[in-house]
Image (cartoon, rainbow, N blue to C red):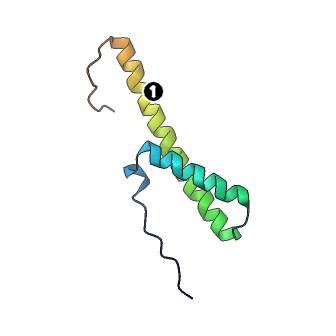
């Protein structure tokens, strides 16, 4: 019996926000089905947590940029900041 090979996804930090959101939706659907063995379900849950944290970080960064733009009244793109 041939094993399904899964291509490795790029690190979560390199994925777009939309890709992260789509994968989170897919993971939620898979977990809701409840048909995975425990180890597979735990792996999906762990992946979901990593994705959710990165997505939350991205939203926080976007909110900070918006707040900074609104405070300054400037419409020029902001340089990366920390």
Q: Residue at x 55, y 46 (%)?
A: 52
Which quarter of the figure has residue 72? top left
Nearest the viewer among 79 and 24 is: 24
Q: Position of residue 58 (x, y in %)?
A: 44, 38
| Residue 20 falls left or right of residue 42 | left
Examine the rendered structure and indicate whether residue 67 appears above or below residue 4.
above
Q: Residue at x 47, y 39 (%)?
A: 57
Q: Position of residue 77 (x, y in %)?
A: 27, 25
Nearest the viewer among 74 and 6 is: 6
Disc count in the image? 1
Q: Residue furthest right?
A: 34
| Residue 79 falls left or right of residue 2 | left
Q: Residue at x 63, y 68 (%)?
A: 40
Q: Residue at x 48, y 76 (%)?
A: 5
Q: Residue furthest bottom?
A: 1
> Which quadrant of the figure contains the N terminus?
bottom right
Q: Position of residue 82 (x, y in %)?
A: 34, 33
Q: Which residue is mark 1?
A: 63
Nearest the viewer among 4 and 71 is: 4
| Residue 12 falls left or right of residue 50 | left
Q: Residue furthest front?
A: 1
Q: Position of residue 68 (x, y in %)?
A: 37, 19
| Residue 32 falls left or right of residue 69 | right
Examine the rendered structure and indicate whether residue 4 appears above or below residue 38.
below
Element assignment for label 1 = helix
Tell me the crowding category of disc 1: few under 14, some 14 to 19, or many 20 or more residues within 10 angstroms, Cα based.
few
């Amino acid at each position: 019996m041939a094993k399904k090979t899964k291509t490795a996804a790029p690190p979560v930090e390199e994925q777009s926000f939309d890709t992260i959101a789509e994968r989170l939706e897919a993971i939620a659907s898979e977990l809701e089905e409840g048909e995975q063995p425990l180890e597979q379900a735990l792996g999906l849950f762990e992946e979901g947590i990593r994705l959710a944290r990165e997505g939350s970080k991205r939203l926080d960064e976007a909110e900070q940029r918006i707040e900074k733009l609104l405070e300054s009244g400037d419409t020029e793109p902001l340089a990366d900041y920390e």
